[in-house]
Amino acid sequence: MKEDAAKICRRLLDSREVDGVLGLEMVGNIPTPKVFAQADDLGRFEVEPVFPIVTLLRNIWPFTGKERIALVVRGCHELAIKELAKREIVDLKRIHMVGMACSEEQARTCRCLRPYPTKTDIGTKVKGVEDELAKSLRKMTLEERGRFWEEQFKKCNKCYGCSENCPVCVCEDCALEDCAFVRTEGIPPSKAFHIIRAYHVADKCIECGECERSCPVAIPLRSLQRMLADDIKELFGYQAGMDDRQSPVVTTLEDAPLKEESE
Amino acid sequence: MNYRSVLTTCPYCGCGCRFFLQVVDGKLVGVQPCKSDEISQGRLCIKGYNAHAFVQNKDRLTDPLVARDGRFEKAAWGDAVEKIASELKRVREKYGPDSIQVLTSAKCTNEENYLMQKFARAVIGTNNVDHCARLCHASSVVGLASTFGSGAMTNSSLEFEDAKCVFVIGSNTLESHPLIGTRIAKAKEKGAKLIVADPRRTALAELADIHIQQRPGTDIALVNGMIHLILAKGLAKKEFIDSRTENFEAMAASVKDYTPEKVERITGVPKEKLEKAAEMYASAPASSIAYAMGITQHTTGVGNVQSLANLAMVTGNIGKPFAGVNALRGQNNVQGACDMGALPNVFSGYQPVTDPKAVEKFEAAWNVDLLDKPGLTVTDAMNAAHEGKIKAMLVFGENPMISDPDINHVREALEKLEFLAVVDIFMTETARLADVVLPASSYAEKDGTFTATDRRVQLVRKAIEPVGDSKPDWQVVSLLARAFGSKGFEHTSPREVFEEAASLTPQYAGMSYDRLENETLCWPCPDKSSKGTPILHIGKFARGKGLFIPLGHIDPAELPDEKFDLILTTGRVLFQFHTGTMTRRSPKLEREAPEPLVEINTADAASRGIKDGALVKVSSRRGEIKLKALVGDRTAQGVVFIAFHYAEAAANVLTINALDPKAKIPEFKVCAVSVARA
Amino acid sequence: MPEFEPRILAFCCNWCSYAGADLAGVSRLQMPPNIHIIRVMCSGNVKPEYVVKSLVEGVDGVLVLGCHIGDCHYISGNHRTIKRFALLERLMDDLGIDKRRIRVDWVSASEGEKFQKVVSEFVAQVKSLGPNDIRRDAA
């Protein structure tokens, strides 16, 4: 798949349709993030493993000036970019998405219901995979669920990985870093940390799973987000990233869409 | 936009996580975890995520400084280096080479430590070279060398995640070695048994099956008690003992009296708990011991470590996966600094300076005559300076004014020196006392290697240009050597230094930068075909047979009395690191733990009329500090805890300069204090 | 053993529910004493973070009282309130925390009796849930 991806990116660079391609390059045997500026540089282009590429894009976006950037996106990345674009954190006009469908194995690892982007340029679409843990959590009683999450959060050592790697965790004045809400009392941190984090990303979460993958103690955050995504769908008929005219439901005053329809 | 992602090794603790420094247009903008890194697996602790924050801080030393009339004045590199060289030469001329002490840095690279000890030995002509390992794992280096033949962690950090039983003693692992602590937490979730022995109810203790809260300074009694029970219950591994060890009888005799009742009297640990812990550790198919400062920082530090070695050998838990005696080393490169010979009694690779063969080898390699008498340790040197026997010190990246015991004593010692030169990245409390300060470059501004706690050697890569006019320490050493007129310091890159060091250090002999580009190697790596040695002592110990050591309980140097009625034990918190020079300049870290606190038990606080958050005075025979109280039940009754990161209420003003006689490590974990409302 | 008396915070909006509370007091309507009132300008002012903080630090129940829909002094502040707390309650349920420890309701300035009713019902409900033990294993 990486050869197909490299071919497309080469064409994009050669034709100067984009100024750079954000992706991975094999440096020795380590896939290393890179912005490829020349088609000739793509010799060691790599698309695995899945990593927080949209978070990285968001972090370097302020430095990209007028440059147009292409990147290989999986289903979740595409949705993350759309959520960021809604908030004008990135500009869709300067982003070229090369869509890549995930393998069956990847879909299973991520328990992803939509392991492919809207436009799939590379790879073949596979079926979505249910999150069994989320399903079994739903069936538990309130007490059982409470005990489960208490055991999980006891392990937390406040690395902030779930927040650092999340593509849509973007507030300038982060509530998690406000000791009025989350006491700075060592580890494990106050449960307020987890509740506030989940609440804040709830209407933006596109279920990429980076939160869970970057947790050193493997707290199943992905499953929690799955449950919340269902809640939001039920409450507001809204799914993050899927409709770029719907507004985020809990952070604007009116129900008006963020962008004018004519754009 | 010029964007670069540079894979390097974390400058904080000994876990050895690697990550990508994010560089845009020559500035560090953040850290991206590396999913392919074996140790971190794409995860980091909060310090790792903020490892870029202090590098381009405005406080960075950017120019050489020379003290004149109580102020620092900027100087040119040439002049500053010349001043250091001429002063050191003058002192050497007048008092002899052994009147000079060199302190190397456990934060600096292997290449730099190698050159620093070469400088001390080949240029100044003294073996007075040491570093902060003296303050942390000197007990391990001596203790494990005596019992196993090698003073390092016996297994690899990766194994903790699949361990069946882990006994953690004297280590607040989730806070001090986060990415090892988290592996232990995951093992526990997979069904492993976890025993934690710590006077405090730490975050890891909360997850444990058994939490033992022993009185500080009673570890030998505790472990002897466990061994006593293991022998009594027939859980010892006779075959292992017979075929792979010696001196078992003497050790068995020494634990005969350590009945559960006697152990309870000494340690305060209920005998039911002791029994459960002993059975749990001895019955698992493989059990791992993980330990740190709670074991090493005592006047009986060496004995404490040896007791753990006894425990592991009695149960056959050496030389196989998911087992071992695992010394968790604090600094990012303290293991490497030791490996590179920044120690007064050995050259690199632990080759003793008293061994004529070793002396011959290094004399030939360096083309100089070398001294064959061991030099002074850091702790002995401070005492010697206080007595006027050490006249000059050259300090690389160390801050004894906060990290050493009995700070008032340290200040007096340093002020007595005729000359003090400090090389560092920030103006530390120690640098403020110096005659000359040279600005060093940080880990992000140079190439090199660090060796993690599990003997894993990893590359450090330059991501940005040196800040201001700072220079990497390896270049500083070269300049100093050349100012002395010495040869042997003409290396043009860290790669060349590594080649020289590896050629003289058997454990590193098979390593090279080309190999390290594509693999991490755990020493020993004796030749190019070796893939490194994650697990030590398989089949046989480094010294042949493991040596049992008979041990008995000895009281700490200073116990509570009527005037100073509480035990002070010192340690760390997750968000700060050591003397705070880096973390306190990282906003997100400082924010999490901005102020010094004394943790005091609810009952002890109540009887002293102390409310949570109140300002209190903590005093010892050495001094007094004022800070806020954190009242709760994390710390056992009779014990108070202070983290040593805060210069404004430095815990080491209170600690006692009592040393383990063999390892010379200070007893940071026990001294007597009183606490009262301020 | 002393009966459990819950500690309850009530965020009341300045224009409607706080005035309603005032009216209840002036009319000497009997009410349980467990409520601590915090006046805010609008129920839409009440960030879920305040409620989370209260519960996490051991408060037994939280009331958020605003103007009736359509009557908000700031037009749509209470729209925000409904949406936010609907989501927060779902999240709490997902995490195994009893969402009955939170209640959102509307009380106008003239509804002293409604204030009394809401408060009495809520105190009784929280009493039946027992003490909030969320901090039981905090240091």
Image: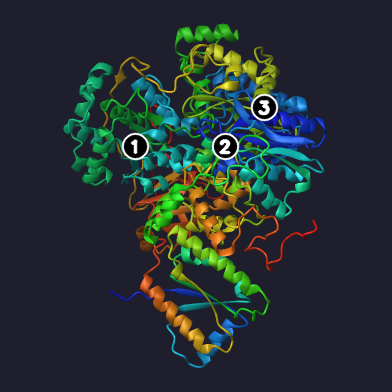
Instruction: Write down the chain letter for disc 2.
Output: B
Q: Which residue is mark 2?
A: B399
Q: CA distance from mark 3 to mark 1?
A: 49 Å
Q: Which residue is mark 1?
A: B167
In the picture, residue C22 is in which quadrant? bottom right
Amino acid type shown at disc 2: Asn
Amino acid type shown at disc 1: Phe
Q: Secondary structure at mark 3?
A: helix
Mark 2 or 1: the one toward you: 1
Q: Position of residue B281 (x, y in %)?
A: 28, 35
Q: Secondary structure at mark 1?
A: strand
The total of numbered circles placed on residues is 3
The residue that appears at 62% across and 17% down in the rendered structure is B497
In the picture, residue B415 is in which quadrant? top right
User: Do pointers 2 and 1 mark residues of a single chain?
Assistant: yes
Question: In which quadrant will I find the N terminus of chain A?
Answer: top right
Q: CA distance from mark 2 to mark 1?
A: 32 Å
Question: In which quadrant will I find the C terminus of chain A?
Answer: bottom right
Amino acid type shown at disc 3: Glu
User: Do pointers 2 and 3 mark residues of a single chain?
Assistant: no
Q: CA distance from mark 2 to mark 3?
A: 52 Å
Q: Residues within 10 Å of mark 2 (few under 14, many from 20)?
A: many
Q: Which residue is mark 3?
A: A3
Q: Is residue B68 left or right of residue B329?
A: right
In the picture, residue B671 is in which quadrant? top left
Instruction: Write down the chain letter for disc 3.
Output: A
Dots 2, 1 in contact, CB < 8 A: no
Mark 3 or 1: the one toward you: 3
Instruction: Write down the chain letter for disc 1.
Output: B
The residue that appears at 46% across and 67% down in the rendered structure is C99
Q: Which mark is residue B132?
A: none
**Residue B675 shows up from this direction:** no
